[in-house]
Image (spheres, rainbow, N blue to C red):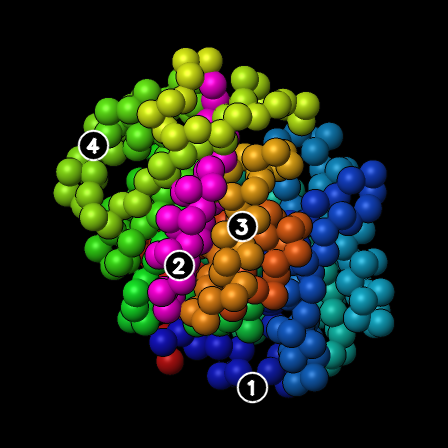
Amino acid sequence: MKKTIRDYELENKKVIIRVDFNVPISDGKITDDNRIIQSLDTIKYAKEQGAKIILMSHLGRIKSEEDKEKNSLKIVASYLSKILNDDVLFSESTRGDELEDLINNLNPGEIVLMENTRYEDLDGNKESSNDPELGEYWASLGDIFINDAFGTSHRSHASNVGIASHLPSGIGFLIEKELNALSVLDNPERPFVVILGGSKVSDKIGVIKNLVNVADYILIGGGMAYTFLKASGLSIGKSLLDSENISFCEEMLNKYRDKLILPIDSVNAKEISENASTNECFISDIKEDDIGLDIGHSTIKLFKQYLNDSKTVIWNGPVGYSEIEQFSNGTKELCEALKNIDAIKIIGGGDTAAAVINFGFKDAFNHISTGGGASLEYLEGKSLPGIEIISDK
Ligand code: AMP
């Protein structure tokens, strides 16, 4: 068990909290504040406990001087100040006198947000390659380190692993919530059904290999399903094909034919476009010039049969090209079905999270992970370095 923020006496301590403020910004406006909202419990708790709060986060990627301006966290400092109804100081530097003075003058309960940790990437990728000097320097600014950025916990960066190597450390409430939700994998109530979709088989190989040993069934949809269908000897027209992984799919189908449930019909179009007209057919009838872009009605019915009996469901990857209305039906129908099913239902981040929230099904799920890559690596059975490094209880 990892230590949490509750395991420390925070009063009057300089507490560095690594948050995930990597929010989308367009025309100088934050277009989705979910990650900021998700970090509030930890920040508010630290404030109530009388901590001197130092917030750190990355935002986007910094490869050139021009990237700096559009990825400054200054706008997030003002936004946070507004929603907390409290002052949030901002340090324009990621090291040096300005940052140190702001921190050393903090009173208990006061908050400073440091500029984007990845500004340090311009000078030798220091943040992203976990430069030892940088981690040690940032750690020297605080007394306690709390990691609450689940979305970057699968990476070893100076602002998580680097700092945690030098300070007493714990996880914040968001990471605790994510770990509690994903820990259903350790002992899932059965039947345990996994829904996998999305584009490429290559992205999901690790997840399939790991979960095929734990799940009762894996329902496969999305672009990746067509490589499995090809591997089982069917023609898939111009549908997405991950040719390098056909043999992997063959091997999986040979070993786990009863566990891996493939689509039996498909919604197709000649082009991926908002104006595309669609046709629906059994897989064996897909025409040479068709692109399969969603699961059809018979597959939805088939998948629902597995879901209706399930007690635990984990879903990663939309089962169709759900950004376009004509190909979103399968994903919506599975959301609708899951809404009415009494099971533990978890969305493993990324595109599926966006789809489910956009379609208005947020409340149908017990947990929607905030970390796409991190939750995927967790589902692969890998340990997450940003969490691994945190002190044990
Ligand atoms: P991933 O990031 O691997 O979860 O993939 C998500 C992406 O897969 C989304 O952008 C979907 O539009 C896309 N996708 C889902 N189904 C298909 C399909 N049948 N063909 C091509 N792309 C798809």
Q: Amino acid at mark 1?
A: Glu
Crowding at label 2, few (<14), some or many (≥20) Cα neighbours within 10 Å?
A: many
- On screen, 57 above or below 280? below
In-front residue for pair 163/256: 256
* Residue 294 lies in the magenta stretch: yes
Q: Are marks 1 and 2 in contact (CB under 8 Å)?
A: no
Does label 3 point to a residue whose CB lies under 8 Å from ligand 1? no
Disc number at residue 333? 3
Q: Nearer the viewer, mark 4 or mark 3?
A: 3
Q: Nearer the viewer, mark 4 or mark 1?
A: 4
- On screen, 386 above or below 176? above
Q: Are marks 3 and 1 in contact (CB under 8 Å)?
A: no
Q: Nearer the viewer, mark 2 or mark 4?
A: 2
Residue designated by label 4:
250
Q: Amino acid at mark 3?
A: Glu
- Residue at (65%, 80%) from the top-left corner? 45
- On screen, 212 above or below 220? below
- Residue at (49%, 83%) from the top-left corner? 7
Residue bounds of the magenta highlight: 290-318
| Among the 4 quarters of the image, the one containing residue 255 | top left
Alpha carbon distance from label 3 to label 1: 48 Å
Disc number at residue 9? 1
